[in-house]
Image (spheres, grey):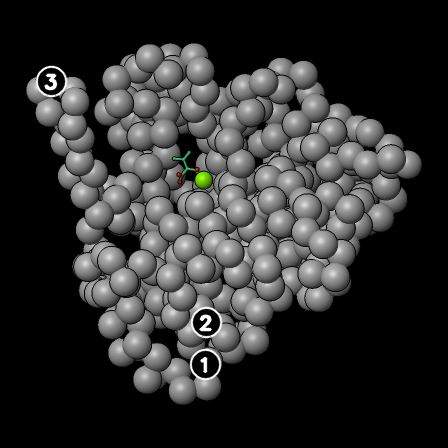
Amino acid sequence: MQAHIVTLPGDYIGPEIVAQAVKVLEKVAAKYGHSFAFEEYALGGASIDRYGVPLTDETLAKCNAADAVLMGSVGGPKWDGVEPARRPEKGLLALRKGMQVFANLRPCTIHPQLAAACPLRPDIVAQPIDVMILRELTGDIYFGKRWRSEDRKAATDEMAYSEMEVERLARIGFEMAMKRRKKLCSVDKANVLECSRLWRETVARLAKEYPEVEVTYMYVDNAAMQLILRPAQFDVMITGNLFGDILSDESAAIAGSLGMMPSASLGSGTRGLYEPIHGSAPDIAGRDIANPLGTILSGALLLRHSLGLEAEAAAIERAVSQVLDEGYRTGDIFSEGCTRVGCTQMGDLVAERI
Ligand code: IPM
Ligand code: MG
């Protein structure tokens, strides 16, 4: 098949990790007889430096014309002084909104080889952990009205959701649960927030269409606690943008390292935005020591969800697992007795095993 993939390396470690994922995808293309055309554009700080804005209209248009978009990471101290409306993160948010990718899939599974990197008690991790956090991505307090008083001493960020936004996200959650273990946990703060009450009512209404799915409702504070106490109880978790941001970092810590975690953001079609869930790690940028596996695994999700190439996606996941089996580790997941490798070498090792 022929596919057109836009890459947005972004800032600090972004270009290092995206290069590894591209290398692995190119190996997949060669091995399975596909042709992937990659086109690179600037996003975040890189775009501010070049064009004065974190996302140009042209870049967004290119993303919307592609089959899929692979992103690295944006932001960092270099642009901390930039006015809020032009921060690198604004570019990422505008990209998500502009591509209308409202459903963010953040899978949390523990690679058995990395069990030692998991901070939880061994008896908790011994149970199978396979949680799919489905985070709403284009609404909530991220996109609500903001206000700052003239004397700068008071501020407001508005949380807003519409029934339509909740419903389209929840539907994906129910469909996903049907293909998995048929359990769905809806996370909100309905004891306090009106948005959450709307969220809960909408999910409850939709649940009637999916009688086979066992639905539970959890307040976000309890969910944060349950995720570390008994992570094995969860199958699909659906939640809003802000809660999902927080819970997915927590789930990444459970999995051993933020560097391992891929994500996929989808809209109503197959076009998607794929990015590791970690940030731009300015402290280790340019030293070729970042963990590229989260981005490489995001490449696998890209093949699966946007291009429908399941066997190829599985080949990447197998190659990553094999490299871990063989004891290769970047610094963030290193433990005694393993072989420490850099970012480029990790990319090479995975590509060789495709
Ligand atoms: C994430 C990040 C982003 C978010 C930031 C960089 C805007 O934390 O993808 O989880 O909050 O969504
Ligand atoms: Mg986050």
Q: Which amino acid type is marked by label 1?
A: Val
State the residue at coordinates (46%, 80%): 214
Q: Position of residue 73 (x, y in %)?
A: 49, 30
Q: Nearer the viewer, residue 125 or 297?
A: 125
Q: Secondary structure at mark 2?
A: strand
In the displayed structure image, the side of residue 238 where residue 351 appears, left or right: right
Q: Which amino acid type is marked by label 2?
A: Leu
Is residue 32 positioned above or below 127 on the image? above
Q: Secondary structure at mark 1?
A: loop
Q: What is the crowding at mark 2: few (fewer than 14 residues within 10 Å), some, or many (at least 20)? A: many
**Identity of the residue furthest to the right in this view:** 337
Ligand 1 found in image quarter: top left
Q: Which amino acid type is marked by label 3?
A: Asp
Q: CA distance from mark 2 to mark 1?
A: 7 Å
Q: Position of residue 77 (x, y in %)?
A: 44, 15
State the residue at coordinates (87%, 44%): 326
In the displayed structure image, the side of residue 330 where residue 141 appears, left or right: left
Going from the N terminus, do you reach mark 2 or mark 3 first? 3
Q: Looking at the rendered structure, which numbered label has been put on residue 213?
A: 1
State the residue at coordinates (18%, 43%): 158
Q: Secondary structure at mark 3?
A: loop
**Label 2 belongs to which residue?**
184
In the displayed structure image, the side of residue 45 where residue 295 appears, left or right: right
Marks 2 and 1 close (CB-CB < 8 Å): yes
Going from the N terminus, do you reach mark 3 or mark 1 first? 3
Q: What is the crowding at mark 3: few (fewer than 14 residues within 10 Å), some, or many (at least 20)? A: few
Is residue 81 positioned above or below 131 on the image? above
User: Closer to the observer: label 2 or label 3?
Assistant: 3
Does any portion of residue 338 appear in the rendered image? yes
